[in-house]
Structure formats: structure tokens, C-alpha cells
Image (spheres, helix red, strand yellow):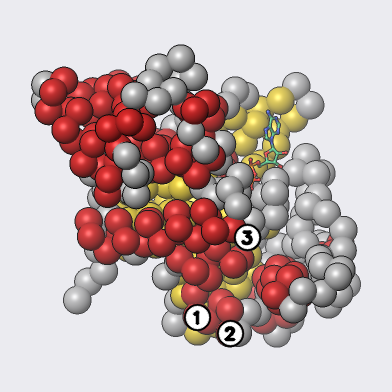
Amino acid sequence: MEQEYTLQIENLRSSFLTDNGEVKAVNEVSINVPKGSIVGIVGESGCGKSMTARSVMRLLKYPGKIMGGSILLEGKDLTQLSEKEMQSVRGGEISMIFQEPMTSLNPVVKVGKQVSEAAMLHQNISAAEAKELVLEIFRRVGISEAEKRYESFPHQLSGGLRQRVMIAMAMICRPKLLIADEPTTALDVTVEAQILKLMKQLRDETGMSIIIISHNLGVIAELCDYVYVMYAGRVVEEADVFTLFESPRHPYTKGLLNSVSALELEQERLETIPGSVPNLRRLPAGCAFCARCAYAMEYCPEQLPQLQEVAHGHRVRCHLVEGGAANGEE
Ligand SMILES: Nc1ncnc2c1ncn2[C@@H]1O[C@H](COP(=O)(O)OP(=O)(O)O)[C@@H](O)[C@H]1O
Ligand SMILES: [Mg+2]
């Protein structure tokens, strides 16, 4: 049977066009989200994860711009839509949850009203019907005393409750795709586990697709079916979650995984990857990871490795898996 995709990002390029030149934050990125699946995007801070998500929503902060590629939502190319058409996609067909719920909620409006207004914006329903819908979804996302919370202002709620409100807001229009950008980063581990479980449950109940963005591989392991690893604006490895954790091939992915296992063993010093993400203004012509890579070869800084399929659905961008530089030409 042919695979149905909710979202297909193809060769997406998004940049910041600054006075000092182009910052290639998203560089030839292709990501597929099969219907009903949870797809993870993982990588250290500054690798272009949020920029990828914001490109899908067409909500790039100035001076960010989509430079090329396509973003197909059930076959419809979002890069070609007018701003007006895009507005009905946002919050209707695609919802996004941001890292810090406080910045996405209006501090002076009661949360119930905010969510019911979102419902009324996209559906032809009365205020009373919207309120009923909101109370129902509040209960569904585990907000206890829904009626009381409905009348609360954002600052009167805990971080966990605020994030549940954001999830309720994202779910209220039954989106085809939910994009969650670091949705649990500001929360403690217990609340984090509850929120992750909730997202999985909503996927199971509604059949929607989810993209979850995180710098935390533990979160990814918990939730995802398929994972994309991003480094310096590019996808460097992609695989189903089992393969990625059992047989990672890219030295960067291995490094990320090592820091997770160090954490699990409660070692005092977390074994992180030495060095940091390079300045996207001054990327080498070749592999952007080579300066931090223990296995870097002479030609790695010069020649860009291509994404190579090493097993069905498992792709790696590294000269180590190519067996030489011969395939390195762009
Ligand atoms: N206003 C800006 N001008 C230039 N570069 C920017 C701007 N905002 C973000 N960037 C760069 O874009 C890159 C990608 O950022 P982002 O997508 O937020 O990364 P992530 O979500 O993976 O942490 C970062 O390296 C960052 O330095
Ligand atoms: Mg981010």
C-alpha cells in the first residue's frame, strides 16, 4: 500500500538575510511525516529546528526568509499560498505549540476565553457551544476543575497547566498536523512525562500527525516513530526510532546518544560532544561537524557528504559510510 503523507518538506532552504550576509539556518532539508505518525527533529540548540518549524507555519522572524524548496501539506504547497490562505492553515490544519507557553498566551485574558476564541475563529459555532467544547477539551488534556481553570488568567496557572492549555488550544480545531517545539523544556520531569503521554494519546485517538522538536533524545525516544537529526541547518541522519537508537551511524548522533546514557548512569560529568555548533555564517564547504568529529578525515572539511541510504529508511550524511570521497560531489 502506498504511504500517505500529511507533510512533505522537500529541499527546504530558509535563511536570515542579514547586513553581514546570508545565514543558512535551514539548508536543503527534506522531512516526511506519514499520516498518523510522530516524527522527531533532534539536535543541539542553534541547528535550525525551530526555523524549520516556523518555515512550515510561514512565521519566520525578520530577516528570515524561505529561499527555496517546497512544503506540501497533503499535497498543497504552503510556500505558494497567500498570507490570507496561510492564516486559515494556521490553527486550522496545522497547530503549533511553542516552548514557552507564557509568551503565546495573552496575560490579560482568561485562558478559557482565549481557547474558545480560537475555536470560534475556525469553526462556525456560538460562544456557548465554544465554551462547552473548551471545557470538554480541557478535561481531555487533563486539566482538573476545568470550569474553574476556564476563568483563570495565565499567571494563575502552573507551567504544566499552561502547557496543557496550549495543547488544548492547538487541539481545538482538530489539526491534521501538530508541531510541538520543545514543548516540555520548561517543565519538570514528572509533568514532562504526563505531557508526552498526553500527546501520544491524542495521536492515537485522533489519528493526527505530530512533529516534535527537542534537543533531548530521551523525549524523542519516548514519543517518536521516526527521527531526523539536524546539525548546522542540515539533516545529518534519519531513521526509525529503533534503528536510530540501536545503530546510529553519524558521529554526531553517537555523540548525542552518549550524553543521554551518561545522564541515565547518573555520572557526575555529562559526556557531551566537545566543541559547539559552528557559526552558520562561516560554514566549511564540507561537513559542518568535522571540527568536532573524532573520525574526521582530510577531505571532510572540503567535501560535503551526501545523505546516503545505508538501510531501508536509514540515511546518513557522513563520508565514513560512503567508503571514500568519490561520492562527495554536490
Ligand atoms: N535574527 C537572526 N539573524 C541571524 N541569524 C539568526 C537569527 N535568529 C536565529 N539565527 C540563527 O539561526 C540558526 C537556527 O536557529 P533555530 O532554528 O532557532 O535553532 P534551534 O531551534 O535548532 O535551536 C541559529 O544558528 C541562529 O544563530
Ligand atoms: Mg529552537
Report which quarter residue 97 is drawn in.
top left
User: Residue visible at 26% across and 69% down?
Assistant: 3
Q: Nearer the viewer, mark 1 or mark 3?
A: 3
Crowd around label 2: few <14 · some 14–19 · many ≥20 (10 Å): few
Crowd around label 3: few <14 · some 14–19 · many ≥20 (10 Å): some
Residues 254 and 128: in front is 128
The answer to whether residue 62 is above or below residue 215 is above
Kind of residue indicated by mark 2: Glu
Please provide percent x and percent y for residue 176: 27, 48
Crowd around label 1: few <14 · some 14–19 · many ≥20 (10 Å): some
Secondary structure beneath dot 2 equals helix
**Ligand 2 closer than 8 Å to label 3 CB:** no
The answer to whether residue 201 is above or below residue 113 is below
Secondary structure beneath dot 1 equals helix
Circle nearer the N terminus (1, 3): 3
Q: Which mark is residue 246?
A: 2
Report which quarter residue 294 is drawn in.
bottom right
How far is mark 1 from mark 2, CA to CA? 6 Å
Please provide percent x and percent y for residue 219: 55, 63
Q: Which residue is mark 3?
A: 216
Q: Which residue is mark 1?
A: 242
Please provide percent x and percent y for residue 178: 36, 47
